[in-house]
Image: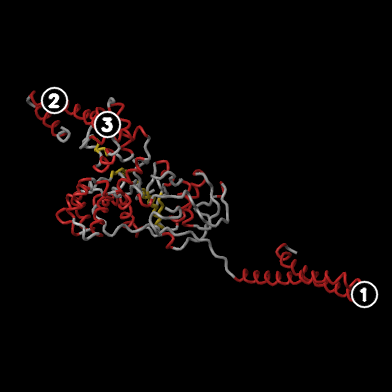
Amino acid sequence: MNSAKGKKLFPIVLTVSATASAILIGLAGEAFGDQLKELFTPLLAWWKWLLGSLVVINVVAFGWDRWHTEQPAEAATVPTTQSGNRNVFNQGSGNTIIPGDGNVTASQTQGDVVAHKIENHYHGSQLPTPDSRLPTPPPTNRLRQINSPPRDFVGRKTELTELLADLEGGAVISGVQGKGGIGKTTLALKLAEKLGQQFNGAQLFLDLQGMSATPVKTTSAMEHVIRSFHSETGQLPNSVAELQPLYQSTLQTEVSAGRRVLLLFDNAKDRAQVEPLIPPDGCVMLVTSRAHFTLPGMKERNLEALPMADARDLLTELCDRCGNEAEELATLCGRLPMALRIVGSFLRERRDYPVARYLEKLRAARLKQLPEVAASLQLSCEQLPPELLAYWHKLSVFPDSFDLEAAAAVLEVDADEALDPLSELARFSLLDWLDAEQRYTMHDLASDYADSFLTDDQREELKLNHAQHFCQVLAEAGKLFLKGGEQVVKGLALFDRERTHI
């Protein structure tokens, strides 16, 4: 008799035995006179209680077994991730990588969570190959995780055209980088929408939480992709080296079956987090991150503030009563998409609030009216060591773009010593590097935020350093001008380049 049958027959055998014992005890009590009857009667009462309990147990066990065998086993499911930055982690070759930010309001994470049914365990050489028989692909809706871009999306035509051209031209990786609030995630969503019809296999999304204190682990990102296709995959390896073959195999199986896959990893921390996620040929990967990093074959693009025409269009699209004030509003917003949306939404929701009054408040204290921008900048600042952050605060003294020598003068270090912190700040998108001019620049709103951390004494000292340096620049421009000939043009060019500072 096997163990399953034994478990089913045991209560029955026990009940029959108890019943027979009760009958024998009762007969013995009747057969042996009053003295023995007094002995057996209490025992018989206890035995009847036991007999009744066993009958109830048998009835319940029989009913449970009958119901369980008639019900089909339910397949384990994986929560869909249709809500943008909210996915199974609760919270953004032919690959395109778009490093960008993950929207401050959706940057919270509870760690790396994978809630799935565990049925199998893969070990080393047992990882399935592209030819292995994997579970049936999941329902299509679970593989459509990327949200649509905002319906009022405006601009970025050049960037979209170039990114699409890269993909059509067979580029392995395309990259776009930029500061928080610049619109990298929105651009990635728009690009994914344009690519959507080409990817019939899956369109997967995951916020990598790069700006949080606990970024999503690379292994957890791989698990998210694998379990999106195969929810019943059991306990997975916990190292990148062991998990990567299964990650690649899962995607290659889709490609081999004629199903292309689009992956959007939002808000990446750095190269180390993203590089193992590069999928096989036939897939496209979009990644947003504030950090500037490179990957082999990646074409880099730095996403800048919107052109004035697009900034005005976005404001008027959000609120038609901006009218003639749209350009000044856009200027005060630094043409930053996040700031433009805050302003446009405020004026649209409060139809009674005069645009002129709101302009006055922005002129007086921009960041006070744009708290989301300040929060976005704070996330970037939290990634910096204190000394580097102090350098960034000091650079807010520059009202326009500046070169390495000017930065060194303000920071009171030599040029070689200033280069490393400036380069690091540019890598975190807290400074922008203007390649054509060979100069650095800080966004207006970032400059306001950095300046807010300076004391009055610090600010006065920095202004003095700034003035002394540009007095020397002005003197040099004058000497060149007075030399005459070709030096006149050089002197005028130097003056024009530094006119704002002078």
Tell me the amino acid under the disc marked 1.
Gly
* Chain-order first, disc 1 or disc 2: 1
Residue 456, quarter of picture? top left
Q: What numbered label is drawn on residue 475? A: 2
Q: Nearer the viewer, residue 436 or 442?
A: 442
Tell me the amino acid under the disc marked 2.
Ala
Is 107 rendered above or below residue 23? above
What is the CA distance from the residue labelled 1 to the residue labelled 3? Answer: 111 Å
* Residue beneath disc 3: 458
Is 129 rendered above or below residue 271? below
Horizontal side of 444 relative to 267 (left or right) equals: left
Q: Secondary structure at mark 3?
A: helix
Q: Secondary structure at mark 2?
A: helix
Q: Secondary structure at mark 1?
A: helix
Neighbor class of circle 1 (other Cα within 10 Å; few <14, some 14-19, many 20+) is few
Q: Nearer the viewer, residue 83 or 471?
A: 471
Tell me the amino acid under the disc marked 3.
Gln
Instruction: Assign the N terminus to one quadrant of the image.
Output: bottom right
Q: What numbered label is drawn on residue 33? A: 1
Please state the horizontal and vertical placement of residue 394, each as a whole percent of the image.
28, 33
